[in-house]
Amino acid sequence: MKFSMRSAIIAAAMMTPAVAVAANSIAMHRDPGCGCCEQWAKQVRQQFGRNVQIIDDARRDVLQRKIGVPADLSSCHTAIIDGMAFEGHVPIADMKRALAQHPKGVSGLAVPGMPMGSPGMEVPGLKAQPYEVIAFGSAGRKVFARH
């Protein structure tokens, strides 16, 4: 009996690091083959210091509905970080601020479309377009940041 209990404790201890690593991973569902998503993921990986799992997802609309991303705020990829949804080319600083503050009634941030100059959409020699980052959730929608 003692051996079984000890084995169970050791097994649980060995699984803990794997669970912790998995919890720190970032899942990014994208339209299959979208290249700008990879550029955004690279920036997120560098700024967060975490693995970004890129998932080609032809049925991303199902995920978006499930996690509450409004259809009119849709873009080319949806990331889940620490339980919050980030739709499109949301700047990393805005993501970090939302994750640190966890605003009441906000389940995610979105940058609709693919504005030129947003993270992952930078093109040398082209001027960045102005765009807004929209917070969404049970509290409704509001502008979270302007760029």
Image: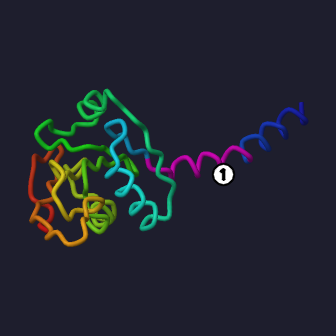
* Residue 57 shown left or right of residue 103 in the figure: right
Residue at the limit of the structure toward the front, as seen here: 125
Magenta-colored stretch includes residue 25: yes
Q: Which secondary structure class fits the magenta region best? A: helix
On the image, the x and y values in percent for residue 53 come to 48, 46
| Of 113 and 67, the residue lying toward us | 113
Is 17 drawn above or below residue 8 in the view shown? below
On the image, the x and y values in percent for residue 40 come to 34, 57
Magenta segment, which residues? 14-26
Q: Quadrant of residue 73?
A: top left
| Of 42 and 108, the residue lying toward us | 42
Figure label count: 1
* Residue 81 shown left or right of residue 3 in the figure: left
Q: Quadrant of residue 145?
A: bottom left
Q: Residues within 10 Å of mark 1 (few under 14, many from 20)?
A: few
- Give the labeled residue for mark 1: 17
Magenta-colored stretch includes residue 138: no
Residue located 21% across and 39% down the image: 69
* Residue 103 shown left or right of residue 54 in the figure: left
Residue located 16% across and 53% down the image: 135
* Amino acid type assigned to the residue bearing label 1 in the image: Pro
On the image, the x and y values in percent for residue 112 come to 15, 49
Local SS, label 1: helix
Residue located 10% across and 49% down the image: 141
Q: Considering the image in quadrants, where does the C terminus appear?
A: bottom left
Is 60 drawn above or below residue 108 in the view shown? above
